[in-house]
Amino acid sequence: MAVVLVVEDDPFVRSALVRELTEFGHGVRSVGTALDALRDAVGNPPDIVLLDLGLPDLPGAQALRMLRGVRDVPVIIATAQDDDAEIVRLLNAGADDYLIKPFSGSQLNARVAAVLRRAGRSRPAEVLQIGDLRIDMPRREVTVRGELVHLTRREFDLLSYLAARPDEVVTRRELLAEVWHQAYGQDQTLDVHLSWLRRKLGETAQKPRYLHTVRGVGVRLSAPR
């Protein structure tokens, strides 16, 4: 299992990729631009990057070179163009593998596993630990101070998404897109699930321990201070 950074500007495609990788037990972060990918890779290095070539701010090849300049992280290119010359050029520029769109979740997972094996970075489990909160991604289990917390699938997805980006404010729109796979949705849906999560984690909106609402922006998950 791995922490995968998905770099894809199409919110629907990005949501589908996040969903597929999460279902295979990976921790997933996602961004929509090359510059956001660079900031993410520098601040909190992933195990592997899935890089779309059709980004709005930089050409894919340039994004690959810049990413290679800041981090030695495996990169899988996702492209809609079945162009042998371009693929060879990207592999020579530092890409570790490539996938031609459209591709299945099983194919993507197999490529991720293969690239990590070659890089010597595959890990038997992915566990996120924030304070006394422990999230076992492959088992989809959450414990607080060693006590098992029973979560629904959506609650787990929401909590694990926030936990993969600790101390970072994640916008409400992004949570609706990445967890609920909706470009737009009712804020009440998010608020209700946050309320349920807080109750199960032993906190309230008035006295938060892990889940902190930033009014008008989004939600931050941080270890209790």
Image (spheres, grey):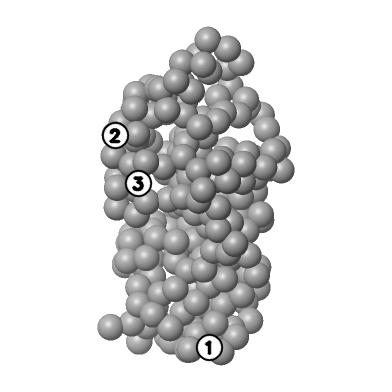
Element under label 3?
Answer: helix
Reading the chain from its start, which is encountered first: label 3 or label 1? Answer: 3
Q: Amino acid at mark 2?
A: Gly
Q: Amino acid at mark 1?
A: Gly
Q: In this picture, is 146 found above or below 108?
A: below
Count of marks overlaid on the render: 3
Q: In this picture, is 220 found above or below 170?
A: below
Q: CA distance from mark 2 to mark 3?
A: 11 Å
Element under label 1?
Answer: loop
Query: Which residue is the site of mark 1?
Result: 146
Q: In this picture, is 161 found above or below 140?
A: above
Q: Nearer the viewer, residue 31 or 96?
A: 96
Q: Amino acid at mark 3?
A: Ala
User: What residue do we see at 55% from left, 24% from top?
Assistant: 79
Q: CA distance from mark 1 to mark 2?
A: 41 Å
Q: Which mark is residue 41?
A: 3
Callout 1–callout 2 Cβ contact below 8 Å = no
Q: CA distance from mark 3 to mark 1?
A: 31 Å
**Residue density around tag 3, few if under 14, some if 14–19, many if 20 or more, within 10 Å:** many
Query: Which residue is the site of mark 2?
Result: 69
Can the viewer see residue 92 in this picture?
yes
Among the 4 quarters of the image, the one containing residue 12: top right
Residue 93 x %, y %: 41, 22
Residue 197 x %, y %: 52, 78
Callout 3–callout 1 Cβ contact below 8 Å = no
Residue 189 x %, y %: 55, 65
Reading the chain from its start, which is encountered first: label 2 or label 3? Answer: 3
Q: Which mark is residue 221?
A: none
Q: Nearer the viewer, mark 2 or mark 3?
A: 2
Q: Is residue 138 left or right of residue 214?
A: right
